[in-house]
Amino acid sequence: MTPGTGHETAPRTSRRLAALAQALDTVLPTAAPTGETTHTAPTVLSTGIRTLDDALGGLQPGRFYLVAAAPGAGSSLIATAAARTGALDQQQPVLYAASGLTRADIAARIVAAHLPVDYRRLRAGRLTPTEQDDAVALHHHLAQAPLYIDDGTDLTTGAIAESVPDLPGLALIVVDRLQATEDPRLPLSGPTQITDAAQALAHLARTHELPVLAAVDTDDPQLIAALSLDITITLTRNDDRLQARITERDLGTQAALTLHADLAHARITDPAPIP
């Protein structure tokens, strides 16, 4: 009891403190005497787009990445690329939280980007016999990928967080997408819900030491600024060219780069090399 009050004092929980040496271990290799193995920084995942990886340093644990673009400008395709690369190429467990998309949408994008085949003909069931054979051969490879899709209409950040313990070794969370226009059928829609969701996802990234990447279907600078996030990738599309600007909240613009929008194959790629 606290003397003279008659009330019990709640036990004090110690804060989690880290010495600088521990913090350095998360970003730098540890020096070691000759002949000893050095510790390396945590493994980062790829977005599947080399130019973007070079600018971001990959998708790093504990960080939240928001990809913002007007509808049809490519933010959702970057989300798909990150999920596809993490699960298929790097064989890391990925949770794909699909708000407004269906698992069929996602599967079709992955197949179209991977083969590649025309996305619209794939969805319409009009692949050529050769493309159909390629798709069948690809099926087994894709089916082994540790990619887990939640396309429930009741998808919330709470539901996403509840799924994390069910996926041992989870390496990446992708949220596709936060919707600027409010839809009563989609919890992750509307300015207020987007703001709350972005902050919750940033907290989820930090507490679980996971990279979390989310797409939002707006490039409204006021709404994006109101989210006050650490890392934002803003896209602007002009035909098949994408301009990407990477900003950090406290440091401003960190990089500006050009990407290629290959919409026929539902993917974003590096720009073609200049002859």
Image (cartoon, helix red, strand yellow):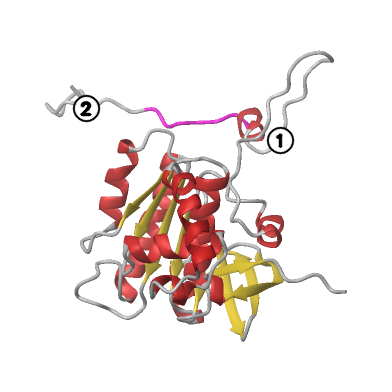
Across and down, in percent, residue 128 comes to: 50, 70
Q: Is residue 174 magenta?
A: no
**Residue at 81% of width from left, 15% of height from top?**
33
Task: Tell whether 189 sits left or right of 20.
Answer: left
Q: Earlier in the sequence, mark 2 or mark 1?
A: 2
In the image, is residue 19 part of the stretch drawn in magenta? Answer: yes
Camera-side residue of 67 and 206: 67
| Quadrant of the frame with the N terminus | top left
Q: Is residue 169 visible?
A: yes
Residue at 35% x, 69% y is 194
Q: Position of residue 177 (x, y in %)?
A: 39, 67
What's drawn in magenta, residue-wise? 14-20
Q: Main secondary structure of the magenta part?
A: loop
Label 2: how many residues lie within 10 Å, few (<14), some (14-19) or many (20+)?
few
Estimate the x, y position of residue 173 in percent, counting from the top left.
43, 50
Q: Which mark is residue 9?
A: 2
Q: Amino acid at mark 1?
A: Leu
Residue 185 or residue 91, whichever sits in front: 91
Q: Residue at x 64, y 66 (%)?
A: 269
Q: Nearer the viewer, residue 273 or 5?
A: 273
Residue that sits furthest to the bottom in the current view: 239
CA separation, marks 2 and 1? 42 Å
Looking at the image, residue 155 sits to the left or right of residue 33; the answer is left
Q: Place residue 214 in its image quadrant.
A: bottom left
- Kind of residue sitting beneath label 2: Thr
Q: Are marks 2 and 1 in contact (CB under 8 Å)?
A: no
Regarding residue 230, the answer to whether it shows in the image is no
* Mark 1, residue position: 28
Residue 109 shown left or right of residue 188 in the figure: right
> Could you tell me residue 227's position as x and y percent?
44, 68
Q: In this picture, is 153 found above or below 91? A: below
**67 relative position to 105: left or right:** right
